[in-house]
Amino acid sequence: MFELDQVRLQITSKTDPRKKAQLGQFLTPGRIAEFMANLFKPTVNKNCSLLDPGAGMGVLSIAFLERFLSGELNLDSVSVTAFEIDDIILPELHRQLQPYSQLNTITVQVCTNDFISDAVKKIMKSDRPLYSHAILNPPYKKITSDSNYRLQLRQAGIETVNLYSAFVALSLSLLKPGGQLVAIIPRSFCNGPYYRSFREYILHYSCLKHIHLFHSRDSAFSDEGVLQENVIILLERNGSENEVVISTSTDDTFSDLKHNTFPVDRIISPNDPDKFINIPTVTTIPNLENLHGISYSLSDLGIQVSTGPVIDFRVSDFLSSMPTNNTVPLLYPGHLTNQKINWPIEGFKKPNAIERNPETEKWLFPNGNYCLVKRFSSKEERHRIVATAISHGSFQHERLGFENHLNVFHQDKHGLPPTIAHGLAAYLNSSAVDEYFRLFSGHTQVNATDLKRLKYPSYQALQRLGELVLTDTPPNQEDIEIQLMLLSA
């Protein structure tokens, strides 16, 4: 695999970024390919037909063939069908697969036609060829609602918004009963309305057997500069599921690989109409669901959360790099550091203030105590949710502006009691919340809708937590975790 990785890096460096974007192409590193191939389980079927759509240089097919040759899969033969449309990569794909095609137990077919069009035609035929295995790193690119791809997919009963989910759904449709599919795809399919139809499709025709999660967002395709949280999944066509294996590693070295097994209803709640796929991780952090006191919605608490209403480019005429007599603070995520407010900032890339006038008044909040959560966490931040409480006395202004990349906890667009604002921030910054949030959110952002979906401690428990934080000697994060368990047990 080392030689393949060297070739992959050479091809990647020479490929025009515009072409890469057009194809949604990110070539698979060798270590990830080997891990994916190792997820396949031996079956009673001795003759394998392997589908590799979007094959690239063939690294996934090769990883599978190497495992076949080791005897671990207990197969007699393998027939590979590899699809690739990139004329730059095709010669390398032929070169890499050619030695394997010389073996009596292996046949190789390279297809240069479009996989989506080809697969839809096959699915529409009753005598379509069926594969026993599929391994794929599909292209990542959005499909517009009026595109030819979208129309073709609908003919096959598939409704989805991205090439990667289209490739997975089509490959699954071409599998025999009991067939296995392994894919590395963005985690974004696990939740949200855009991928609901796709989740329903794969859960109807297959069962989840294994999910691998990388703790580091950019580890899977680090040399491509991709900031995207990826998972590796194993699906079994028409299989039965009682348990799902969840494995985790920090990055693609798999040096700290851990496994655990969970009941399927912990991964996909039978009562969830959206079919969200939750991914618990192997950890000693207490499960938020087991802390009985944490059972309140924001509505129960009389608290709301909204996206910051100030969209800077829409009010650009009223923005100021530094505060003046007729301006009020405009807070961005960059003003929140280590759970403290730093405002104004000299030389800040964004404006520090917004003019207060009849046109901007509707976007401003009264000065008060608020809990703010960044919508996007940086790679350096340990937790996905990063909350900061701000106090009324921090600003000598009647109004405040909150930029669109912040979420704001408030009460009817007014401030919160100080203990509630600080109690909310302490709760949201806890490891238990971070762990739970990662179960249902694969996005690299935190939206107001996500925060509404969380459960919270009682109003009184948040007050007590806030009181602890506001003492002269505030507790450290470890003490807060302990207090959270005591207050919510």
Image (tube, rainbow, N blue to C red):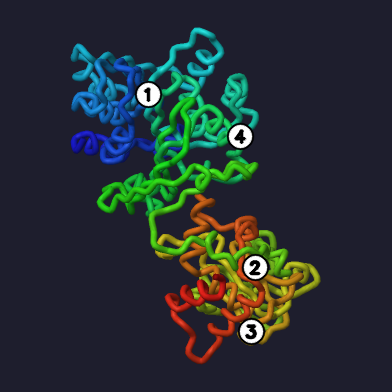
Foreground disc of the pair 3, 4: 4
Mark 1 touching mark 3, by CB under 8 A? no
Structural distance between the alpha carbons of marks 1 and 2 = 48 Å
Name above or below for residue 475 compared with residue 195.
Answer: below
Q: Earlier in the sequence, mark 4 or mark 1?
A: 1
Q: What element carries label 2?
A: strand
The disc placed on residue 395 is 3
What is the three-letter code of the residue carrying label 3?
Phe
Characterize the local packing of mark 3: few (<14), some (14-19) or many (20 or more) Cα atoms within 10 angstroms. some
Q: What element carries label 4?
A: helix
**Residue 165 at what x, y percent from top left?**
51, 33
Q: Which of marks 1 and 3 is nearer the N terminus?
A: 1
Quadrant of the rendered structure where residue 90 is?
top left
Q: Which of marks 2 and 3 is nearer the N terminus?
A: 3
Quadrant of the rendered structure where residue 108 is?
top left
Structural distance between the alpha carbons of marks 4 and 1 = 23 Å
What is the three-letter code of the residue carrying label 4?
Ser
Q: Which of marks 4 and 2 is nearer the N terminus?
A: 4
> Which image quadrant: the C terminus?
bottom right
Q: Is mark 1 on a helix, strand or loop?
A: strand
> Which image quadrant: the N terminus?
top left
Characterize the local packing of mark 1: few (<14), some (14-19) or many (20 or more) Cα atoms within 10 angstroms. many
Characterize the local packing of mark 2: few (<14), some (14-19) or many (20 or more) Cα atoms within 10 angstroms. many
Determine which residue is flagged by label 2: 408
Name above or below for residue 130 compared with residue 58.
Answer: above
Determine which residue is flagged by label 1: 133
Determine which residue is flagged by label 4: 197
